[in-house]
Image (cartoon, grey):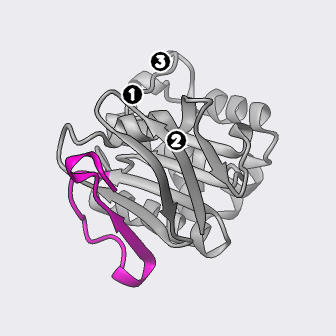
Amino acid sequence: MFSVFNIETLIFKINRIDFSDKINYICDKNGSGKTLFLDSLYFDNKVRIEPHIDKKDIIYLSQHFSFYERIKVKDFVEFFDQINNENLLEKIRKNSYINNFINENFNKTLYHLSGGEFKFLYLILLLFTDKKLYLLDEPFNELDKEKAKYIANLIKDLNKNGKKIIITNHYDLGLFEEKDIKKIRLLDHTV
């Protein structure tokens, strides 16, 4: 279990919220503050996480991300590998599904990937990076069923290996079993 203290956004204030060691799944309607919640958790220096987790030990998949679209997939993967010092290329080579996906798109530019393909690539790189806490804002948007299931399985594996995970979504996609998740609602700006 871990706790977060002092989350304050434009639409709500939460003094303390306790998260489970399961996958924490914030499922709520548009405008309920899911993204604001994750933004506060990641960007607000007044927010406290106990036991303590440094910002450098947190991965945050924001809903809104962009990269220079003329970079090739191979260069993007290598760049990501270098800045994170994670041996991502080695992890990718060991995983036939991911290795095939990367090889099929190796010489394409990011511009030539579909939105779902790019999000899948980016999620893979984030989830293969070893951190303590993963904040994933609507990670399944734009993914087809096969890729969504694959990402869900990676998330389950991370969680089984002791990683803390918070996911947001608008509705339950049925990708996780009830025993694997703790559902959280931000109804009326309370948890």
Magenta segment includes 107: no
162 displayed left or right of 143: right
Q: Where is residue 184 in the image (x, y as percent from the top left)?
A: 34, 62
Looking at numbered disc 3 in the image, what kind of residue is underneath it? Answer: Glu
The answer to whether marks 3 and 1 mark residues whose Cβ atoms lie closer than 8 Å is no
Q: Quadrant of residue 95?
A: bottom right
Q: Distance between the residues labelled 2 and 1?
A: 24 Å
Q: Work out whether residue 38 can be spotted.
A: yes
- What residue sits right under mark 3 in the picture? 69
Q: In which quarter of the image is residue 1?
A: bottom right
**Could you tell me which residue is drawn at 52 percent across and 15 percent down?**
68
Q: What element carries label 1?
A: loop
Point out the frontmost of discs 2 and 3: 2
The stretch in magenta equals: 169-191
Tell me the tag on residue 104.
none
The residue lying toward the viewer, choosing from 1 and 128, is 1
Q: Distance between the residues labelled 3 and 1?
A: 15 Å
Tell me the tag on residue 64.
1
- What residue sits right under mark 2 in the picture? 6
| Earlier-in-chain disc, 2 versus 3 | 2
Q: Is mark 3 on a helix, strand or loop?
A: loop
**Could you tell me which residue is drawn at 38 percent across and 31 percent down?**
9
Q: Position of residue 121 (x, y in %)?
A: 50, 43
Looking at numbered disc 2 in the image, what kind of residue is underneath it? Answer: Asn
Q: Where is residue 27 in the image (x, y as percent from the top left)?
A: 27, 57
**Could you tell me which residue is drawn at 28 percent across and 61 percent down?**
145
Which quadrant of the rendered structure holds the C terminus? bottom left
